[in-house]
């Protein structure tokens, strides 16, 4: 009888365990420990694992390349990747429009769909690599992305403006929250991806980015630079935040406890981990000169609230790995401080399901077939369409009437290239340039005339990407080999470079680049478009060689001369083999290959293009900028187009007045002559892999444009305050700029017309705790179906403090068929009426407010007032 009872008990226990969710015996002890138990709370699992780790093991997981802890079954983990508008690496993915283009859609739900697709592709690649086991590249994590960038684009000269959502805190918040939610997923138990909004905070200069000392009032910080971060933390529930390189009012952000703990955690309730911008802890020691030693730098950062260090590509920046143990050993850091940081980093790993059986996580079922799928290509196309802004359309020259057109000339610097902007992945599907999009759309019905871009260069410039081919599968660019030695020995890592502008300290981290001493070899072909005598130049730190058609033209391998030049005769259209070898020996890494092309006599620069424009019915000129002008590490010095492009458009317009300009750029441009003379101007931003098709859809009327500017277009660089002036109240953005802009914030035209009428408010006088309901009617009175972006701005009561002229508080993108009407309603809360004052509190002041609703900040169609009869402070909600 006792035997039967024992057998029954054993059978029952076996069946009970069989009903438990599967678990992984990470430490191989045959027991389900708390940290291995998927049914335990995250906090209990984290605490149990921390209790089993030594203090030095805890410190090891606080760097982006966290080593394995075999005795606990903890695998090596490489944190960090980029996904501003598509996964960057490893492999190929869908490339959506750049972030500034996402903002130009003014469509948060669409952006949620985009970021959901991005995270689907990331998880699919993670699954394809056996839950990351076969993912070995640095900065290629598929579960933690250092995106989005929600720094405010206060000055369009900033080199990273294209990565942002524009100049307005509210628009940035709405787009950013949608992006974070799409990345992280909606599963109640597991995160799909860790989203990391960056760079916290006030990060806006590239030329001095490692030691920038931003100075601003708390009022400017609270009312302008922080609200987007707050929204992404409190509403978006972002799991991580990246601290910035710069200092604010003398304290570097990476060591700023007031920012990283008092505001981020104590005020906003952030419960994730803070990661440094790559190398930032080392910059506390130098060049900030804030920490007297590197041990002090480690201590300052961890005490301030920095949990994870991205040591990045910096040679002496491995502060947590190399100096945190030393700081602990001499008593500058305590074990509870290390525990606090380690627990935050581990919590994210548990939320991602890394320590659980894959069958429990719904995201492990996403298949690789989603990557570059037809659905994602269609979404990339739709997003590019919605981002395009029609800036001018004189005499309704657009959409083009094919009944009147038999030939089109298409040319310009960005006509035949696909400019994606910085932090861009490699598309799985063939990307579509503006020229190719036009050919795809109407190439069978009209003759498309084109010539390759030949800039009339009067100064030395880095040779643009379009002139190089690698000869490999990815034809454009140069084959690039990186050697972990200074003499090109060993087995290299390989990649493709658009051109030769090698500047790792000021470019996004590249996992293929080894630490100095190192060497690089670029090989491929060069096809010039003009015959004549060229001046080729290599600028570098270290040794270099240049070969053209196997002939050694520059040999400076042992001499560290900064610049070498050589004159060489090249023929237009001829293919030349090119090879550049470079060695970095002392930790400094920079190499560029530039040229000065043969100059033409005045008036002869664009004769062939003028001739082509003259014999075509319409000329489409694709102008703008690219990463040689704006990107991480490179600020713009001017808002104007380069001189050769300014001359080019004048020459083409002179030849054919039916000229349309398409702008491809990541920020605003001072295109005054174009605006005054050219009949139609279209802004396409960096439109992603489907950009050319989207541009063609707009030009030929298959899509009615409704993108809106997420930043102000100024008339000249001289309209801007000094670059290092962070006080937004001093004439920055549509809120404080006093002059007339070239194009105002929120601006964008349509092929149809919309009327606004019958504005009404539910109560003309309110207590501060009331909610305000305002509504109006919008009607499509034009000839086309189309979208309208209805924008609500608030005008505050008069105040002794400087207040915005108006401030965006709500918007809706609506679709209306011809003659259709729609009632649009907005709700405003107490929070919407408050503004940070000089007493350091968000407060609603009593007085007369005005609600202005229109098609842009400069086109207000309806206005209504209301009064607030009591005041109230929000404190620091």
Image: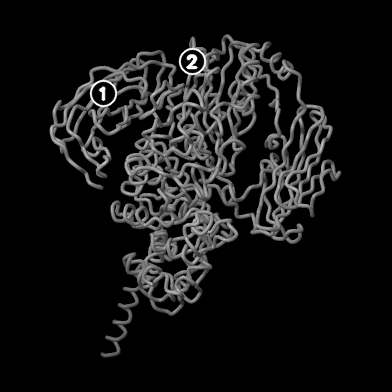
Q: Say left or right for 847 vs 436.
A: left
Determine the residue positioned at 20% across, 22% down: 760
Question: Whole-percent x and y of residue 296?
Answer: 46, 65
601 over 801 or under it: above or below: above
SS for dot 1: strand
Q: Which mark is residue 59?
A: none
Query: Along the line of sight, which residue is nearer the eye, 242 or 590?
Result: 590
State the residue lying farthest toward the bottom. Answer: 2
Q: Say left or right for 117 vs 528.
A: left
Question: Whole-percent x and y of residue 408?
Answer: 63, 16
**Residue 127 visible at all:** no
Label 2 to label 1, Cα distance in Å? 28 Å
Question: Whole-percent x and y of residue 56?
Answer: 47, 73
Query: Along the line of sight, which residue is nearer the eye, 574 or 463?
Result: 463
Query: Along the line of sight, which residue is nearer the eye, 569 or 134?
Result: 569
Earlier sequence position, callout 2 versus callout 1: 2
Q: Quadrant of residue 336?
A: bottom left
Q: Say left or right for 88 vs 785.
A: right
**Residue 503 visible at all:** yes
SS for dot 2: strand
Residue assigned mark 2: 393
Density class for disc 2 (Cα within 10 Å; few <14, some 14-19, many ≥20) is: some
465 over 137 or under it: above or below: above
Query: Along the line of sight, which residue is nearer the eye, 55 or 791?
Result: 55
Residue assigned mark 1: 823
Density class for disc 1 (Cα within 10 Å; few <14, some 14-19, many ≥20) is: few
Image depth: mark 2 or mark 1 in front: 2
């Amino acid at each position: 009888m006792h035997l039967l009872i024992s057998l029954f008990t054993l059978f029952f226990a076996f069946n009970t365990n069989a009903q438990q969710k599967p678990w992984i015996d990470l430490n191989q002890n045959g027991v389900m420990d708390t940290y291995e138990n998927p049914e335990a709370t995250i906090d209990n699992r984290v605490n149990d694992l921390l209790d089993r780790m030594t203090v030095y093991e805890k410190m090891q997981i606080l760097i982006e390349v966290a080593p394995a802890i075999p005795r606990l079954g903890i695998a090596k983990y490489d944190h960090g990747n980029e996904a501003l508008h598509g996964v960057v690496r490893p492999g190929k993915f869908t490339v959506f429009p750049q972030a500034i283009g996402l903002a130009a859609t003014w469509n948060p739900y669409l952006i949620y769909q985009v970021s959901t697709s991005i995270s689907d592709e990331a998880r699919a690649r993670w699954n394809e690599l056996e839950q990351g086991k076969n993912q070995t590249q640095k900065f290629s994590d598929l579960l933690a992305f250092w995106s989005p960038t929600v720094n405010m684009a206060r000055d369009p000269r900033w080199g990273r403006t294209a990565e942002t959502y524009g100049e307005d805190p509210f628009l940035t918040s709405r787009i950013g929250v949608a992006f974070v939610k799409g990345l992280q997923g909606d599963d109640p138990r597991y995160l799909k991806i860790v989203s990391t909004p960056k760079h916290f905070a006030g990060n806006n200069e590239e030329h001095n980015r490692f030691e920038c000392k931003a100075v601003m009032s708390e009022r400017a910080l609270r009312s302008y630079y922080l609200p987007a971060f707050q929204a992404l933390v409190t509403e978006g529930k972002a799991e991580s935040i990246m601290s910035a390189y710069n200092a604010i009012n003398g304290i570097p952000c990476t060591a700023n406890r007031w920012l990283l703990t008092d505001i981020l955690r104590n005020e906003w309730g952030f419960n994730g981990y803070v990661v440094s911008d790559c190398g930032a802890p080392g910059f506390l020691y130098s060049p900030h000169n804030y920490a007297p030693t590197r041990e002090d730098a480690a201590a300052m950062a961890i005490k301030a609230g920095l949990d994870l260090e991205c040591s990045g590509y910096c040679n002496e920046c491995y502060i947590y790995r190399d100096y945190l143990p030393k700081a602990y050993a001499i008593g500058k850091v305590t074990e509870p401080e290390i525990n606090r940081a380690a627990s935050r980093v581990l919590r994210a790993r548990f939320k991602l399901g890394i320590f659980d059986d894959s069958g429990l996580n719904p995201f492990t079922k996403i298949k690789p077939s989603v990557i570059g799928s037809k659905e994602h290509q269609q979404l990339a196309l739709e997003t590019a369409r919605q981002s395009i802004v029609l800036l001018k359309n004189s005499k309704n020259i657009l959409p083009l009437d094919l009944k009147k057109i038999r030939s089109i000339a298409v040319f310009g610097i960005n006509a035949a290239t696909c400019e994606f902007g910085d932090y861009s992945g490699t598309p799985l599907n063939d990307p579509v340039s503006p020229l190719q999009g036009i050919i795809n759309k109407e190439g069978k019905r009209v003759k498309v005339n084109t010539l390759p871009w030949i800039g009339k260069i009067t100064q030395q410039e880095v040779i643009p990407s379009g002139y190089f081919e690698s000869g490999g599968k990815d034809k454009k660019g140069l084959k690039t080999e990186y050697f972990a030695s200074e003499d090109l020995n060993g087995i290299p890592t390989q990649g493709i470079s658009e051109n030769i502008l090698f500047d790792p300290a000021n470019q996004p981290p590249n996992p293929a680049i080894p630490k100095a001493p190192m060497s690089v070899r670029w090989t491929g072909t060069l096809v010039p478009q003009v015959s004549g005598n060229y001046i080729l130049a290599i600028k570098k730190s270290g040794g270099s060689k240049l070969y053209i058609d196997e002939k050694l033209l520059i040999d400076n391998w042992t001499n560290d001369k900064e610049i070498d030049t050589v004159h060489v005769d090249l023929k237009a259209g001829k293919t030349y083999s090119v090879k550049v070898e470079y060695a970095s020996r002392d930790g400094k890494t920079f190499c560029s290959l530039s040229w000065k092309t043969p100059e033409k006599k005045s008036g002869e620069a664009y004769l062939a293009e003028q001739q082509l424009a003259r014999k075509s019915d319409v000329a489409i000129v694709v102008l703008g900028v690219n990463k040689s002008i704006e990107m991480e590490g490179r600020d713009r010095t001017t808002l104007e187009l380069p001189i050769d492009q300014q001359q080019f458009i004048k020459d083409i317009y002179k030849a054919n007045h039916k000229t349309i300009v398409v702008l491809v750029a990541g920020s605003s441009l001072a295109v005054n002559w174009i605006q005054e003379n050219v009949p139609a101007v279209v802004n396409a931003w960096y439109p992603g892999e489907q950009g050319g098709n989207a541009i063609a859809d707009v030009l030929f009327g298959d899509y009615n444009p409704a993108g809106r500017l997420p930043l102000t277009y100024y008339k000249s660089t001289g309209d801007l305050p000094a670059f290092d002036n962070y006080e937004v109240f001093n004439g920055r953005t549509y809120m404080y700029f006093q002059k007339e802009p070239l194009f105002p914030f929120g601006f964008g035209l349509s092929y149809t017309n919309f009327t606004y009428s019958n504005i009404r408010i539910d109560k003309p006088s309110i207590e501060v705790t009331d909610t305000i309901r305002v509504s109006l009617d919008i009607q499509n009175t034009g000839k086309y179906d189309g979208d309208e972006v209805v924008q609500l701005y608030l005008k505050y009561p008069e105040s002794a403090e400087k207040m915005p002229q108006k401030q965006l508080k709500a918007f809706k993108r609506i679709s209306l068929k011809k003659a259709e009407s729609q009632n649009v309603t907005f709700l405003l809360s107490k929070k919407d009426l408050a503004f940070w004052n000089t007493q350091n509190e968000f407060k609603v002041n009593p007085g007369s407010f005005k609600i202005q609703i229109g098609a842009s900040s400069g086109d207000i169609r309806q206005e209504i007032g209301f009064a607030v009869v009591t005041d109230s402070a929000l404190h620091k909600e």
